[in-house]
Image: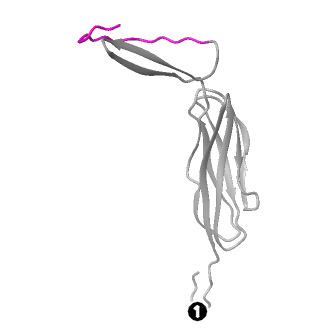
């Protein structure tokens, strides 16, 4: 019970043996008033992000282009990750699965070797599993292939 007009501050300490999220409510009564303060404690979790640019820009037909990007875990719990992307597109990602620790990142190589003219778009999704965590992020690979035309009247392409 807190007397009217009085101020106070509280420090709430929380300790558990279980790795999970908790929620509770702290009730503060003053005269005829009741104030409920929600309390939340988050357990360790994994949070994956794709870091880097997967826009390949213009690529000559049947040439190969490689980019590097990272799967970064900004959470505190180690997790397995798996990349999902359309395998029919001329896209190769190494490694396509692995383990990334809390606060760490894993570098990946993306190789694109388009065989057809025109734009190529492929969503890349990263999925991770940790203690009660499932996260998804998306990035896009895009390219436009072209064939230089040789004009017999000119000495340049």
Query: What is the residue that sits farthest to the bottom in this orientation?
Result: 153
| Depth order, front residue of 59/88 | 88
Magenta span main SS? loop
Residue 107 lies in quadrant: top right
Q: Is residue 102 above or below residue 145?
A: above
- Identify the residue under disc 1: 153
Q: Is residue 136 magenta?
A: no
Residue 115 pos. (x, y %): 73, 69
Q: Quadrant of the C terminus?
A: bottom right
Q: Which residue sits at x=59%, y=52%?
A: 139
Q: Is residue 24 above or below residue 120?
A: above
| Depth order, front residue of 120/43 | 43
Residue 146 lies in quadrant: bottom right
Which colour scheme appears in the figure? one colour
Residue extent of the magenta highlight: 1-16
Residue 82 pos. (x, y %): 72, 42
Please give left or right for residue 5 compared with residue 32 in the image. Answer: left
Residue 67 pos. (x, y %): 62, 53
Q: Which residue sits at x=65%, y=29%?
A: 101
């Amino acid at each position: 019970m807190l007397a009217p007009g009085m101020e106070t501050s509280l420090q709430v300490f929380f300790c558990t043996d279980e790795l999970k999220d908790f929620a509770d409510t702290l009730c503060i009564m003053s005269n005829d008033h009741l104030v409920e303060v929600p309390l939340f404690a988050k357990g360790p979790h994994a949070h994956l992000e794709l870091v880097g640019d997967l826009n390949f820009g213009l690529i000559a037909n049947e040439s190969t282009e490689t980019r590097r990007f990272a799967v970064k875990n900004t959470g505190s719990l180690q997790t397995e990750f798996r990349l999902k992307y359309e395998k029919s597109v001329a896209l190769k990602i190494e490694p396509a699965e692995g383990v990334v620790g809390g606060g760490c990142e894993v570098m990946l190589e993306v190789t694109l070797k388009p065989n057809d003219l025109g734009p190529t778009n492929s969503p890349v999704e990263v999925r991770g599993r940790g203690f009660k965590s499932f996260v998804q992020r998306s990035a896009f690979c895009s390219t436009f292939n072209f064939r230089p035309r040789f004009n017999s009247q000119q000495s340049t392409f």
